[in-house]
Image (cartoon, rainbow, N blue to C red):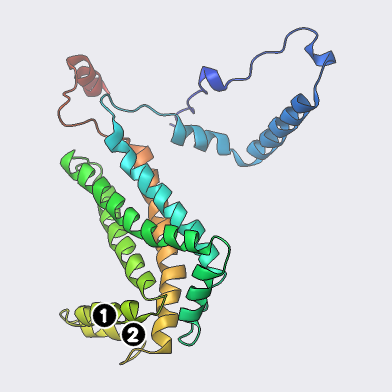
């Protein structure tokens, strides 16, 4: 049996019109009514309001604090990386002859280029730290236990993908530091058992570093990793909404709540 969608909060419900207000319609009110009518037209054909209410308006456990915002902060960091990455891709040339020069041009000559590149560069480190802290909070609060084991595995996979995203993006400026750091990282991967040498050859695009390596890292950084991360974030948010969040471990449920849970 499908449960009905939760009602809208009182603060979001439109107030009833007073008698005589229909005769004094202001342009702003007309614009607001047109927006509401458009939203109703779209919602009637897509039923998105029910999904939005299911996601946004739900009960949270007692004791929820600022530690629970680390997941939202990680999502915001990813969105910031996506937006700044799109702007950087407009000026970047993924070729060994022009990669460094396009990065220099972006940093020194494009309006706000240094600012956008700095946000993207330091944002990658911030995102890794936030994802790690979020997973630490989940671990110490015991939120990885039944029925959230699958969501925990998705989170571990996201941490690995974010780390690989940072690794593939580090080579793109193609200066001396990024080049040799990537050589060391790929050689370390090549020492892994069984699949290590094949993984190193895949990342290099062959036996040696070259033009194929840079284009491959660019494709992985811009297409493969973001697509996988977006898909896993969608699954992660769905499971968080479905199972809810757990209360802090130092709070014990009241006897009434425990009895209600047994009756359910």
Location of the N terminus (image quadrant): top left
Residue in front for this viewpoint, 14 or 91:
91
Q: Quadrant of residue 238?
A: top left
Q: Nearer the viewer, residue 85 or 264?
A: 85
Distance of mark 1 from mark 2, alpha carbons? 8 Å
The C terminus - image quarter: top left
Q: Residue at x 42, y 57 (%)?
A: 231
Which element is circle 2 on? helix
Give percent across and percent down for residue 96. 45, 86
Name the spot of residue 203 as percent of width and height, x first.
33, 81
Q: Tell me what residue is drawn at x 28 percent, y 62 percent.
A: 160
SS state under label 1: helix
> What residue is drawn where x is 29% and y is 48%?
151
Q: Can residue 152 be seen? A: yes
Residue 49 position (above or below residue 211): above
The residue lying furthest to the top in this view is 19
Q: Which residue is mark 1?
A: 186
The disc, 1 or 2, on the residue closer to the chain's N-terminal end is: 1
- As displayed, is residue 8 above or below residue 183? above
Residue lying furthest front in this view?
108
x, y (%) of residue 7?
51, 23
Residue 115: x %, y % from top left: 48, 59
In screen coordinates, is 162 left or right of 27?
Answer: left
Relative to the observer, which residue lies in front, 128 or 174?
174
Q: Residue furthest bottom?
A: 207
CB under 8 Å between callouts 1 and 2?
A: yes
Determine whether, in the image, residue 98 is placed left or right of residue 260.
right
Asked whether 52 or 216 is in front, the reply is 216
* Residue under the point 43% across and 63% down: 226
Q: Is the residue marked by circle 2 packed among few (<14), some (14-19), or many (20+) residues within 10 Å? A: many
Residue at numbered disc 2 = 204
Which image quarter: residue 48?
Answer: top right
């Amino acid at each position: 049996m499908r449960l009905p969608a939760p009602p809208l909060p009182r603060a979001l419900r439109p107030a009833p019109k007073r008698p005589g207000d229909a005769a004094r319609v202001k342009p702003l009110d007309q614009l607001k009514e047109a927006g509401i009518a458009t939203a109703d037209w779209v919602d009637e054909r897509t039923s998105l309001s029910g999904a939005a209410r299911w996601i946004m308006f739900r009960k949270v456990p007692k004791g929820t604090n600022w530690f629970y915002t680390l997941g939202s902060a990680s999502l915001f960091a990813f969105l910031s990386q996506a937006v700044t990455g799109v702007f950087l891709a407009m000026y970047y040339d993924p070729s060994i002859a022009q990669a460094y020069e396009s990065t220099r041009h972006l940093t020194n000559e494009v309006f706000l280029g240094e600012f956008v590149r700095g946000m993207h560069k330091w944002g990658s480190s911030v995102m890794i730290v936030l994802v790690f802290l979020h997973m630490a909070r989940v671990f110490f609060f015991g939120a990885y236990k039944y029925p959230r084991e699958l969501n925990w595995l998705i989170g571990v996979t996201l941490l690995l993908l974010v780390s690989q995203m940072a690794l593939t993006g580090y080579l793109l400026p193609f200066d001396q530091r990024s080049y040799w750091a990537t050589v060391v990282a790929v050689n370390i991967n090549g020492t892994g058992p069984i699949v290590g040498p094949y993984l190193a050859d895949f990342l290099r695009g062959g036996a040696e570093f070259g033009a194929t390596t840079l284009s491959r890292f660019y494709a992985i950084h811009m297409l493969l990793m973001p697509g996988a991360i977006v898909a896993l974030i969608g699954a992660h948010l769905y499971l968080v909404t479905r199972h809810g969040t757990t209360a802090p471990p130092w709070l014990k449920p009241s006897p009434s709540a425990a009895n209600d849970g047994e009756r359910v």
